[in-house]
Amino acid sequence: MVSAQVYVDGSFAVDGDGSGWGTPRNTLQGALNQVATLPSGNRIIYVAAWEYQPTATETSDPRTARFLIPDDTELYGGFRNGDPSVDSRSGLFRQTVLSGETDLLTIPTTTADNAYNVVVVEPGTQGVLIDGFTIRDGNANGSSDPKYRSGAALHVTGNEVTVRNLFAELNVASENGGAIAFDGGFTKAFRMYRSYLSSNRASDKGGALYLEGAAEAEEAGIHGVEPSWIFNSVFYRNLAGEQGVTAVELARNGGGAVFVESLAGGPDLLGALGTSVPDVGLLVMNSIFNDNLCHGGGAAVRLENGGSANSSLWLNCTMAYNQVLTNPPGVGGGGTVYTVVDSTLQPYFINSIVGLTFDPTRTLDVIDAIAGSGSRSVFGNPLSWTLEAFGSDIFTVATGTYPTAGFANFDVPPGYQDAPGRDFRLSAGSALIDAGVDPALTLPFDYPDMNGNMVPFELTPYFYTTSPTSARVVDLVPGGGTLDIGAYERL
């Protein structure tokens, strides 16, 4: 296998050969061009803290400038010049910026000349890793090509991608995926760890993230096939949909943070107390969704199946203070989560909190937190069996409408330490402490694996506010211990 490790530091006036920190490439584009000439193998780029703008255009339009990531590339940011390795880097993720600003002379007067897509991943078979960056200021409002209207920070089609330690903010798309648009073609997987997506906007679907055709994949070094997943991530204050659109458009838009258009069927997982969780195409674990907004369905998340048979599984997630700005027609409340599904697709919530849902026509928490045809919930009507909840605290108007496998929905105030201050850790006395169900999942990887290194039961990075270094400890140990409900564990 041919490998190349290329160093980048934008603070250097002279462009080097990239062989070390003393002679780095001074543009990221130069490093990408360099590794693209190599045979497919282990291509690695180390990037020091700096602000980098794309310069390589796809067409004569300067706004098609983008960082085009070749297949089988590992792109690591967050370095201080001189850091010897990924494991010992300084963690300057916020200072390692990939910016859509193509003309520094216009900052901050206009975004009209910003890049449509800051980062684009080439189609391929080996996948791409992006770890340790802030991607911001993409403006996907083009007209000549659909990709110029989605995924302003990161656009992926036809390749597997893993993102870690990613901050995506202030990106705008005129269609789908304000920050990230992923189309896996039902053959490629999407992976996200320890990421923070905030203040992104999409005019149609998925204020921060739009997933279409995400699939399962063989994970190297683990045990077999796994679903696409989102671990240890925060989605904050993203917006999907537009005010004043037609009823038809409003009905199909939403997902203030995440819009799942369709998923490939994944592995069957063993759920709580032996209950089968079939065809899991997306696993979301230990993640927070707060203060997201939408015009349409799903202030935080909207789930559709696109005719495919699959499930989504939400483990130890917290969703709060998400707001439906305009309800979809004919539905009694857009809900924090909006499901448009049939019997072939079920969202499963285990040890999760979904509540504090705002609605423009009603006061806080008087609409069901989960709405749409997949929940059969219209202002307190009983939910159907197409939505499963185990040991969760999901607000419903009609108390106890999630009676699955003997585990009724808690439907109680979660007892956050400071909900108005957005501190969603559980306070002493909360009914949700040690109240979770041991999922006993037969996942191909160990549960709970908090940071993606396949080592369970450890101190791991977890976001509290915007810090990627805060530790979260899960007191679940083999053979004993009990999980709390929600994204934080109180010891």
Image (cartoon, helix red, strand yellow):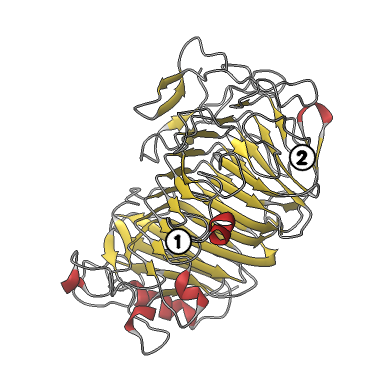
Residue 409 visible here: yes
What residue is shown at x 58% (from left), y 55% (from top)? 251
Q: Are marks 1 and 2 in contact (CB under 8 Å)?
A: no
What residue is shown at x 56% (from left), y 39% (from top)? 333
What residue is shown at x 26% (from left), y 78% (from top)? 15
- Relative horizontal placement of residue 92, taking residue 69 as reference (left or right): left
Across and down, in percent, residue 221 comes to 68, 52
Q: Nearer the viewer, residue 41 or 358?
A: 358
What residue is shown at x 21% (from left), y 66% (from top)? 11
In this view, the residue farthest toward the top is 429
Residue 4 visible here: no
Across and down, in percent, residue 31 comes to 38, 75
Among numbered discs 1 and 2, the one appearing first in the sequence: 1
Assign a secondary structure to mark 1.
loop
Q: Nearer the viewer, residue 187 or 181?
A: 181
The residue that mark 2 highlights is 386
Q: Residues within 10 Å of mark 1 (few under 14, many from 20)?
A: many
Relative to 383, residue 68 above or below? below
Q: Amino acid at mark 1?
A: Ser
Residue 203 is marked as 1
Q: Amino acid at mark 2?
A: Thr
Q: CA distance from mark 1 to mark 2?
A: 29 Å
Across and down, in percent, residue 430 comes to 52, 14
Relative to 6, residue 212 above or below? above
Q: Quadrant of residue 352?
A: top right
